[in-house]
Image (cartoon, helix red, strand yellow):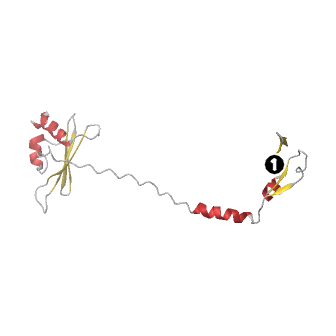
Amino acid sequence: MAEGGRLAAVPSSINSMIDGRWRLGEAGGPMASRIFTVHTSRPRCLLLGPLLILAGCVAPTKPAPAPPAPAPPTYSVIGLESVMGKSAQLLETQFGRPDLDVREGDARKLQYSSSVCVLDAYLYPPGRGGEPVVTHVDARLPDGRDVDRASCVAALARREEAR
């Protein structure tokens, strides 16, 4: 086809595109019947081969490093001096009778609860034998959410049963 005095190259068929031949449109003139051949002296697979090899040379991307795991919470014993290392008898003197007393072997768990919080005191015998003493304390709100352990100890010491 002629547009503005120029001849446009259009493929005469899919096969001519594959073979690299193009036929000029039906515009008439001396070049209308000529077939132009693109120089393809190499088979098509040899042209694609280097491209495929180069595609394999792309540096692999490394996955982003995982963020570091959060550090485990550290438990301070500040404010727990009246509980840590104490015997069950001293806890009863301080908080009154426990709401729950569970024994398993030499270990013992005393639970004190109020409308403010629940305190679990874990007692284990020191070394070889001896009277079990508090080695760990957990505190939570009555609905199960965490609460500051020292605040719970202070609240339980003020409750009516502790007097």
Q: Residue at x 88, y 54 (%)?
A: 34
In the image: residue 57, left or right of residue 86: right
The spot of residue 51 in percent (x, y) is 64, 61
Front position in the image: 64 or 101: 64
> Can residue 64 be seen in this snapshot?
yes
Q: Is residue 125 above or below residue 9?
A: below
Q: Secondary structure at mark 1?
A: strand
Of the 4 image quadrants, the one containing the N terminus is: top right
Front position in the image: 17 or 110: 17
The spot of residue 32 in percent (x, y) is 88, 49
Quarter residue 127 falls in: bottom left
The amino acid at mark 1 is: Ala
Front position in the image: 65 or 109: 65
Quarter residue 54 falls in: bottom right
Density class for disc 1 (Cα within 10 Å; few <14, some 14-19, many ≥20) is: some
Front position in the image: 24 or 46: 24
Q: Residue at x 67, y 65 (%)?
A: 49
The spot of residue 28 in percent (x, y) is 91, 46
In the image: residue 116, left or right of residue 54: left
Q: Residue at x 71, y 64 (%)?
A: 45
> Can residue 12 be seen in this snapshot?
no
**Residue matched to label 1:** 9
